[in-house]
Every structure is written in C-alpha cells, then in structure tokens.
Image (tube, rainbow, N blue to C red):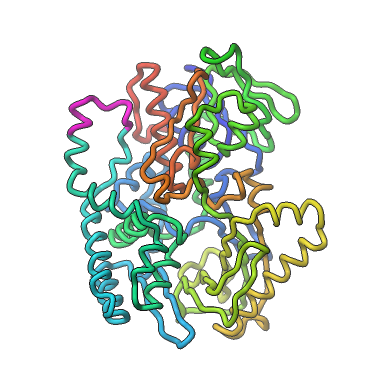
Amino acid sequence: MGKKVIIIGAGIAGLTTGIHLQRNGYDTEIFEMHTLPGGLCTAWQRKGYTIDACLHWLVGSSPRDNFYHLWDELIDMKNLPCYEFDHYIVVEDASGRSITVYTDLDKLEKEFLEKAYEDEKIIREFIGAARKLSRFMLPNDVLPEAMSFVEGIHLLWSALPYLPTALKYVRITSKDFAARCKNKLLRKTLEMMFVPDMSVVFLLFTLVWFHRKSAGYPLGGSLSFSQKIEKSYLTCGGKINYRCRVAKILTRGSFPNALATGIQLSTGATHNADIVISAADGHSTLFEMLDKKFLDKNFQKYYSQYNPFPSFLHVSLGIKKTFENYPHLICIPLERTFMVDPETSMDYLNYRIFNFVNTLAPKGKTVISSLLTTYNYQYWQSLRKDNPAQYRNEKKRILDFVIDAAEKRFGGIRKNLEMTDVSTPATVIRYTNNWRGSLEGWLLDPAVGFSQMKKEIKGLKNFYMAGQWVQPGGGVPGALVSGRQLAQLICLRDEKKFVGARSC
C-alpha cells in the first residue's frame, strides 16, 4: 500500500476523499467523533418514525447533471431511487392566496405572471436568467491546479456566455432582489425559497437543477445515503474509527517548514501518518487542533468577516394520518410574530410534509418537520449547559408553537400525534461540532461570491482540508466536489495519475 493518510471526519467530504485516495493507492484511515457516518447528512429514529435532518433534494439525482457522474463514482446511482418533485414550495399569505414554485421553468413563469403580473419585468428577468444558466454545466470534475494554460483558456471560453449572468446575481441577496417586487406574496416567495441572505445565483442554480429533474429526494433519506457511501469506502479497504475525537494535529518543526505527522485523540492516544487531512469543522481544526499556529491573513479574514449558514431548530412530528392532498413543502403566515429566541423572530413558518415517500413512517402515517433558523446559537448552547430545566422548557415552547400552527393549518394534528422531537443549535454542535451550529458551512452571499478557498495551509506540509469550510455554498454537493478535488490534488503533488471511476 502507498502513503498512510489519516482523515478527520466521516462526513460526505471525508468519505469521498477516502474512497478516491484508496482507489489511487493510498492507505487511509478515518477518525470520527460520532457513532455514525455522514456528519450533518444524517437521520435518526423515534417510535418507528425516521427524522431526516439533512437532504431536501440531492443535486445530481439523474444523469441530466454532471453531479450524477461524480456520485456514481462513489455508489451505483442506478440503484438509488429518487423522487423528483413537480414543485419546490408553496407560499401562502393571510388572505388564502398562494404561489407555487414549480420545478419546470415554463410552469413557474406562468404561475408567477398569473399571481403577480405587476412584476412582469422582474419575473421575466429572473426566469430568463435561470433559462440562461440551464444551458451551463458546472465543471465540477476539474481541478484548477491540474489545468494547463490551454485547458484553462478552453474552460473560460466555454463558460464565457454565462459569466455575466452568474456574476450579476452573485452580487445581490435574495432578500434585496425580492424587495424589488411590488407584489407582497411574490416578494415573500423569493425570500422564503432559501436563506434570504444568500445570493440570488444560488436560487437560480437550484431552479436549474429542479428543471433538469436532477434534484430529487433519495428514498431512504440522508443516513441511508451516507451509509451507502460508507459501505463503498469500507469495500475499498478503508478503515473508520468511531467515537474517536481528534484533539490535536501533530506537527514537527516550525513555520514555514512545519510538517504534519499525525493526530492525538482526546484519550491521549496518538496515530502517525504521512498525510493528515481534516474534513471536520474548519474552525476547530484551525483554532483548536492546530492551536492557531497557522492562521494566515486569509483564514483570519474568513472567520472574522464571512458569514456561515445560520443554525436551526428542527421540530419533527409523527402523525397517525396521511396528507396526500398537501404540498410537500409549504410556508404559511403566522397570526402574530413569534420569538424563537432573544435575537430571532419570525412571521412565517415552513412545514415539510413527507407525504411523497413511504420509507420514513409506518404505513398510513406521516412525518412532518419544521425548520426554524437562528444565528443565536450561544443562547441555546448556554441554556443546555447552564440551565437544563429552562432548556427543556424552551424546547417545549417551540414544540407547542409548531404543533398549534400546524393544527390551525392542517387540522387533526394533536389527536393523531404519536411522536415529537426537537433538536437545537446545541444538538448540532454536540453531534457534529459544526462551528456556531451552522446548517452547512460558508454562506454563498455577495461577500463570499465565487471565492475558492485553499485546501492547503501555507507553512504546513502534508496537511490538507476538505469539506464545507473550504467550499463556499456548503451542502453535500460541495462536500463531494471538495473531497474529490482534494484527492486529485494529492495525486498531483505525488505525480500520480488520478483515477476517478468506480473500481472497488
């Protein structure tokens, strides 16, 4: 076997990196703090119901998008059934009107024009931009460091027709773009499609993936998906150590000629390696495992100026009832503003109704979940640590609110309620250690734009980083691309030809 590689974290990025390195002749070993693979791409069970806390859709669920072929390098995508949606979300207002965000761009344009014709100009601009980008395939299998000058020019030339559109809409947030709308419901729809502070370009690409019918929900859910990738890694000869929290990355020498030599676990045990990769939380990697020794101005800028995704409270209900005639994702107005925590209020609430899949609940029953975003992770973390009784009371308050609002909108909730579950930012931090309990990683907003963060640290050899903290935009597609590109980069550094195809 080739060089010994230690990977910190068995999330999608860590597993992807491990699979590709194993196939290219490296001897890899993963150390994971949790008991399961997937990191944030996970699920758990309560009273026979499965609570899916991650995937709303999988970019690359069909061969119509390049991401499919990258996933297919990891698992056999032909054996991963996915449900493709005809709509993404339905947003309602207090008067009973609604707008459906269809996944087909023609139907979406017609819906927007029928419901908000006074905004015809902005609607045609928005849909026109999505149509433009639908003809562009992201070059996500390309490693920039490996391209020749000619290859770089060719890539730039192929992307040139789409760059003005992408650059225009990466500079404006969804919230600011929506503010241009005269129609209040259309304005709220554009705001609620994802995180309001995210660049419009993300909404456009999301609509493109839906339009291509390549953003379906993998049946079985997030944990099942992660376990399929874990199985591929183990089949390739990789090793995973669970319940192993890495406390320190071992180094020898000093800047600018320091060398990563292994890891030390929280138990004090040490493990040596030729290469060390952190596919774990970026902040804890740099500020704790490396003890701030290699914080250059770029990393300092990231963690002092860039915005991560918000954290969240995830409320799940197991209902002894089916909801066939409801949208799978619906956003409803509240009768009054609700205070989530001292820094967070909301006047709309979303419900995800898993009525399109029969793998998460017993027959005749349904899981309904609601995601309440917040940046006030400290409040929930401090409550759990310093005042457990009040923490439980706050979770119950959130739960009761979500149940009451669901009862008013759907009916038959409380009398058919069999299961409840509430996770908070403190839960996210406890199980994943993700900085600030973030939903993903760096938020793709105008400040970040299309920034590409380095996978290597200046002054520290044989150390690399992968995952959502070096791949702005986050999510499992970002983790996939980050892990694959890192394996390509390591092969490049070792002058080895990279093999990506499934071979084990």
Q: Is residue 147 magenta?
A: yes
Residue 330's place in the image compared with 202, above or below, is: below
Would residue 93 appear left or right of 369 to someone viewing this image? Answer: left
Q: Is residue 187 magenta?
A: no
Looking at the image, which residue is at 34% across and 34% down?
501
Q: Main secondary structure of the magenta part?
A: helix
Residue 379's place in the image compared with 148, above or below, is: below
Looking at the image, which residue is at 53% across and 23% down?
5
Out of 334 and 205, give the one closest to the viewer: 334
Give percent across and percent down for residue 200: 36, 58
Q: For residue 399, what is the image quadrant?
A: bottom right
User: Which residue ends up furthest to the bottom in the rendered image?
Assistant: 95
Give percent across and percent down for residue 419: 68, 70
Would residue 382 appear left or right of 364 to someone viewing this image? Answer: right
Give percent across and percent down for residue 78: 36, 51
Residue 277's place in the image compared with 100, above or below, is: above
Q: For residue 432, what is the image quadrant?
A: top right
Looking at the image, which residue is at 47% across and 71% down?
329
Region in magenta: 143-153
Image quadrant holding the C terminus, namely: top left
Out of 501 and 268, give the one closest to the viewer: 268
Give percent across and percent down for residue 112: 30, 75
**What is the total number of numbered labels drawn onto the structure image?**
0
Out of 197 and 420, give the one closest to the viewer: 197
Looking at the image, which residue is at 33% across and 26% down?
145
